[in-house]
Amino acid sequence: MICDECKVNPATVHITKIINGEKTEMHLCEECAKKKNLNISGDFGPFNFDFEIEPFSVQKFLSSFFEPVSKEIRRTNETLKCDRCGLTFPRFTQIGRFGCSNCYTAFRGQLDPMLRRLHGKTYHAGKVPKRSGGKIKIKNEIEKLKRELQEAVNAEEYERAAVLRDKIRELEQKLTEK
Amino acid sequence: MSLEEILDTSKISWLANLGPDSDIVISSRVRLARNLKDIPFPHLLSERKALEIVELVYDAFKSNDILAKDSKLYLMKDLSFNDRQLLVEMHLISPDLASSEKGAVIVSSDKTFSIMINEEDHIRIQVIFPGLSTESAYEMAGKIDDVLEESLEFAFDEKLGYLTACPTNVGTGIRASVMLHLPVLTMMKQTDRMFSTMAQLGLVVRGIYGEGTDAKGNLYQISNQITLGKTEEDIIEGLNSVVKQIIASERQARRNLKGEDRVKLEDRILRSYGILTNARLLSSEEAMTHLSNVRLGIDLGIIKNLKPEEVNRLFMISGPAYIQKLNSQDLPPFERDVKRASFIREKLLKEG
């Protein structure tokens, strides 16, 4: 097998990546793999795969998420910019990384389609930091109980549903007090 | 700055001990990505500012006496190239951190946890346990997270969760991964089919493919890809349930080896043992291949005089940085192969 990149050397580095069911294969020689900054070159190789090697660049990978609409996005968002770190939206789609946490607020309107393609969801459901999270924690708990309540109703378990309903009321009370 | 202590692999907890399902699972790792609110992410930081972040995080960490006891801070810019590679080989830092002059790492004395500072994110907490122990690894990572959060303000958004430099990590910032040794499934060419279904479950398989489709040393790493919209517990549970199925398949495949196949396998295992105990030149790749066979031989009861954890340790130390550190000098590849062969030979003969 010949290297995909230089088409000269034999390919010795083979990478398969599957994202959301789309399989991408790359076959590279050591030289080209090095050039691509894949830390899997030669002798130093066998261990590094424990970490997240990006078989193709994050940039390419991310810009592909914008591709169908990217031209349009670029045109309408030419001026969209994070006022804290100065990163522009077009630049973000090129480098695939935000500049600071405030970029998420600055680019909020543009992020959902990308997040949905990456994660299938656009809402956080996990851990909440204790300090900033008092209220959020209660809100999430209410959301969780509401889902359980729905399940209980669907299953016609009305006793359980009543308990859950009371719990939700209690928490909502707490929330307004805060 | 000295990394000599890392050479003593008996002090590396996850290598010196075995955990649940250790016949198949080498280790479980959980990593949490965290960032400081309103401070530019590391790729936009100057070296001076990056150093301030290191100090800030280290101070927060030191506020907890139990955690801080016997832990050490290493700045990448103070380490030689080989020492950085050694930390990579020992799974304590990522290759990205090793190549960054802004980076630093806090390492616990038993090497169970490390905190990378100024990798892609300001903070990456990492915990490694032996065997299938993703839950305990997450529990510990979560505690370290809580300690740091007491004195640092993390970038957190009510809707999006923990904010990370790359949108692939946003939400929980968690990456849980399990390193599996699957020699028989690989031999039976079952892995491709199995792994291709995994993407639909939001999981990713990584391995470095050598010639054909064999992963080096038959080691595979499976980790979650999705970080947003699920709880940490659900993410870990999802990973575990798939890993358990793979473990069952590998065990089944091992049991099913009968007749000719079994003899062929025994032959391969004992040939590998013969090579490792006699070779005068061993590349790290060749060492990995034979160590994998020997490890399988122990699990199948074909090789009786060796302990599995001893072979796991040899897996980790057959890398070039370890061999060079052991000999306290840079060696050309040929010399490394000589030293590696004699080191592995002595270890196996001493244990055996």
Image: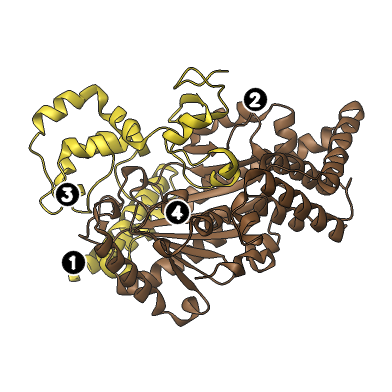
Chain colours: A yellow, B brown
SS at circle 3: helix
| Mark 3 neighbour density, 10 Å: few (under 14) some (14–19) many (20 or more) | few
SS at circle 4: helix
Q: Are marks 3 and 4 in contact (CB under 8 Å)?
A: no
Q: Nearer the viewer, mark 1 or mark 3?
A: 3
Q: Identify the amino acid type marked 2.
A: Gly
| Mark 2 neighbour density, 10 Å: few (under 14) some (14–19) many (20 or more) | few
Residue B333 occupies quadrant: top right
Residue A101 occupies quadrant: bottom left
Query: Which residue is tagged 2?
Result: B212
Q: Is residue B47 left or right of residue B136?
A: left
Q: Are marks 1 and 3 in contact (CB under 8 Å)?
A: no
Task: Name the chain under label 3.
Answer: A
Image x and y of residue A152, in percent? 42, 48
Task: Name the chain under label 4.
Answer: B
Q: Nearer the viewer, mark 4 or mark 1?
A: 4
Camera-nearest residue between A64 and A38:
A38
Query: Which residue is tagged 1?
Result: A176
Q: Identify the amino acid type marked 1.
A: Thr
Q: Is residue A148 left or right of residue A87?
A: right
Q: Is residue B281 above or below residue A125?
A: above
Q: On residue A105, which mark appears?
A: 3
Q: Identify the amino acid type marked 3.
A: Thr
Q: Are marks 3 and 4 on the same chain?
A: no
Q: What is the spatial separation of the Cα atoms under label 4 and label 2, in whole angstroms?
A: 30 Å
Image x and y of residue A103, in percent? 19, 48
Q: Is residue B82 above or below residue B63?
A: above
Task: Name the chain under label 2.
Answer: B
Query: Which residue is tagged 4?
Result: B98
Comes first in the chain, label 4 or label 2: 4
SS at circle 2: loop
Q: Identify the amino acid type marked 4.
A: Ala
